[in-house]
């Protein structure tokens, strides 16, 4: 991956499995967001290939590339909602542009997606009238409008307080468990990484390549690369990771790939 002659990362080789939560981690400026932009199909890699279900993205016809891109929903750091539109109008936009649904069907879909993220009743609110955490969830509802098979998040908890960051992580887990969505997350938030990741890669900004891959807890136990250890322990000598999160865990723990038995609807689980 490069911007002109400025190489960001090279020799990246990893696989994201269907239905897993895959985290891209690394030091600041190492190229996490750049990698995400490549995975979304916005930037062409200078070398190598990106395969979706074995299909070479950049080796495909533009129509096939479009089809792949429609399977991907993205939530950017800012939530990127249109401030002049209500939440309902924001969520409706991708449906109006990329689906053949009628106005009534779009309205139903909008209500459904907002309910999924715990925002029923907020359809007519403007982004400026709701909290940062709710804006993130509204952005997520919009990213999910076209029922993506893959959801990508760039620093989802940026700007959120620990409680709202925790709720967003819970929501990401619920979406994966209930809908089977594959999730790719760029984050350097340790709590989030240990809460949601099934698999992760660590990009080194100095070596400009991927230096570790695996479940973060496994990496914590076994990886002896100083930079990765320092990142995962925040430099704590006892090798534990710092915890600033509320410690409540759902019965049975988290991160099973099985659908959550007590799930109900997503909105049941998400405080509004
Ligand atoms: N459009 C661009 N053109 C040129 N260089 C860019 C562009 N976008 C990012 N960069 C540079 O590429 C490098 C990687 O940036 P990127 O945003 O991908 O890193 P990151 O790991 O996501 O950083 P952070 O953790 O700080 O968000 C940085 O040096 C950045 O300045």
Image: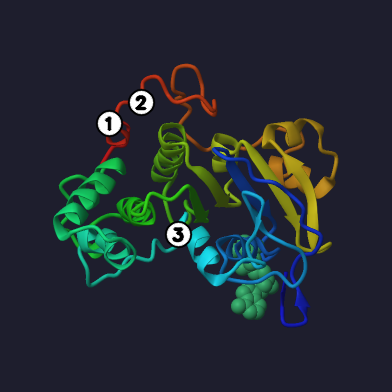
Front-most of 94 and 241? Answer: 94
Q: Secondary structure at mark 2?
A: loop
Of all residues shown, which one is farthest toward the top? 252
On screen, residue 188 above or below 175 = below
**Label 1 vs label 3: CA separation?**
28 Å
The quadrant in which residue 234 appears is: top right
Mark 2 residue CB less than 8 A from any atom of ligand 1: no
Of callouts 2 and 3, the N-terminal one: 3
Image region (quadrant) for ligand 1: bottom right
Q: Residue at x 32, y 31 (%)?
A: 269
Q: Residue at x 36, y 20 (%)?
A: 262
Of all residues shown, which one is farthest toward the bottom? 4
On screen, residue 31 above or below 229 = below
- Label placed on residue 268: 1
In-image side of 132 versus 21 (left or right)? left
- The answer to the question of whether label 2 and label 1 lie on touching residues, with beta carbons closer than 8 A, is yes
- Label placed on residue 70: 3
Q: Quadrant of the N terminus?
A: bottom right
**Label 2 vs label 3: CA separation?**
27 Å
Q: Residue at x 73, y 49 (%)?
A: 14
Write down the residue under mark 2.
263
Front-most of 236 and 272? Answer: 272
Residue 58 appears anywhere in the view? yes
On screen, residue 221 above or below 50 = above
Front-most of 148 and 272? Answer: 148
The quadrant in which residue 128 appears is: bottom left
How many marks do you count on the picture? Answer: 3
Q: Secondary structure at mark 1?
A: helix
Of callouts 1 and 3, the N-terminal one: 3
């Amino acid at each position: 991956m490069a911007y002109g002659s400025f190489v960001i990362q090279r020799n990246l080789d990893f696989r994201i499995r269907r239905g897993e939560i895959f985290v891209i981690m690394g030091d600041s400026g190492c190229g996490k967001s750049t990698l995400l932009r490549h995975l979304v199909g916005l930037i062409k890699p200078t070398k190598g290939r990106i395969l979706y279900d074995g299909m070479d993205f950049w080796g495909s016809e533009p129509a096939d590339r479009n089809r792949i891109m429609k399977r991907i929903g993205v939530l950017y750091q800012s939530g990127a909602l249109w401030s002049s539109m209500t939440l309902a109008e924001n969520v409706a936009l991708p449906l109006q542009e990329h689906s053949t649904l009628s106005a009534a069907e779009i309205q139903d879909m909008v209500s459904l997606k907002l309910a999924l993220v715990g925002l029923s009743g907020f359809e007519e609110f403007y982004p400026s009238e709701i909290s940062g955490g709710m804006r993130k969830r509204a952005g997520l509802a919009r990213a999910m409008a076209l029922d993506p098979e893959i959801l990508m998040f760039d620093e989802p908890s940026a700007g959120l307080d620990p409680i709202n960051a925790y709720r967003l992580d819970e929501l990401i887990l619920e979406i994966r468990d209930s809908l089977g969505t594959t999730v790719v997350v760029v984050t350097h938030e340790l709590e989030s990484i240990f809460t949601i990741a099934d698999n992760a890669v660590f990009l080194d900004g100095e070596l400009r390549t991927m230096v570790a891959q695996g479940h973060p807890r496994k990496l914590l136990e076994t990886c002896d690369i100083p930079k990765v250890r320092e990142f995962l322990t925040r430099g704590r000598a006892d090798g534990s990771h710092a915890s600033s999160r509320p410690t409540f865990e759902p019965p049975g723990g988290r991160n099973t790939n099985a659908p959550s038995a007590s799930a109900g609807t997503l909105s049941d689980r998400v405080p509004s």
